[in-house]
Amino acid sequence: DAILRGADLSDADFSGSNLNGADLSDAVLAGADLSGVSLMGANLQGAVLTDANLSYANLAGCDLEGVDLSTVELDNAEFLRAPESLPLSIQEIFNDHYAWVESGGSRGARADLSGEDLTNVDLAGANLDAADFSEANLTGANLAGCEFVMADFGNAKLDKCNLRGANLSGANMARASLAGSNLCDANFKPADINDAEGRPTGRKWPSNMTEATLTGADLTGTDLTECRLDGADLEDARLEGTGVEPPPPDEAQSA
């Protein structure tokens, strides 16, 4: 979230850095080494990237409007796929789910995307409450601001995802892999349990990250105090403002 608008960063070495959410609009990054950089949700509008190195960079949700990439090294850089590029059968599942959510279940159908390949897909802001993503591969996806209340991500791959500000209230992420993902300001509070008429029962369903892999994930500002974290791997994760203490170095595998 650094503000670097218009800064002259020519030939700077940012290799391997975390620049998630940074504002680099109109910055000069000519000749800069940005290899392996995480730029999830960053603003690069109008930036000068002449001869810059962005190989292996994560550009999920990165705004590159007005940027000339013709001389940029982009080997193995992670870009996003538009939902329209997905197979028609997958697009239909999403459309049916949106109708199901909007109609309160009277139309469409709850999405079953278990085991599907959704790598690098851009779903930012989508309402996917209660969808089934168990064992799906969402590596590198842009899921910023999505609604995932009571969604199932059990055993799913979510490495290097942009989940900034996503609502994961009551979601199941047991044994999911979220290594290197951006989870800043996500919501992991318990979900309200309603009766058949949609009325609150007063009971809550906690979010579950039991045995999840969160190595190197950025969880800054995400309240995890009511989330199940038994056996989660938090090694090298950023935990400022989460209410959770980082594991001791010799107990990095235990939350």
Image (cartoon, rainbow, N blue to C red):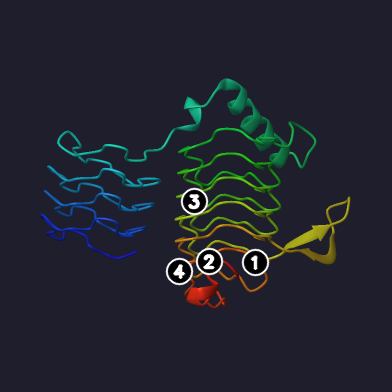
Residue at position x 55%, y 39% in the image: 137
Q: Where is residue 216? Give x, y as percent.
A: 44, 61
Out of 162 and 166, give the one closest to the viewer: 162
Q: Earlier in the sequence, mark 2 or mark 1?
A: 1
The residues bearing labels 4 and 3 have C-alpha atoms spaced at a distance of 18 Å
The disc placed on residue 234 is 2
Label 2: which secondary element: loop
Residue corresponding to mark 4: 238
Specify the farthest residue to the right. Answer: 196
Position of 58 with respect to 226 (left or right) is left
Label 1: which secondary element: loop
Instruction: Give the residue type at disc 4.
Output: Arg
Image quadrant in which the N terminus is located: bottom left
The disc placed on residue 144 is 3
Out of 19 and 123, give the one closest to the viewer: 19
Residue corresponding to mark 1: 229
For the residues labelled 2 and 1, say whether their Cβ atoms are less than 8 Å apart: yes
Instruction: Give the residue type at disc 3.
Output: Ala
Q: How many numbered discs?
A: 4
Q: Earlier in the sequence, mark 1 or mark 4?
A: 1
Q: Residues within 10 Å of mark 3 (few under 14, many from 20)?
A: many
Instruction: Give the residue type at disc 1.
Output: Leu
Residue at position x 17%, y 55% in the image: 27
The residues bearing labels 3 and 2 have C-alpha atoms spaced at a distance of 21 Å
Q: Earlier in the sequence, mark 3 or mark 2?
A: 3
Q: Earlier in the sequence, mark 4 or mark 3?
A: 3
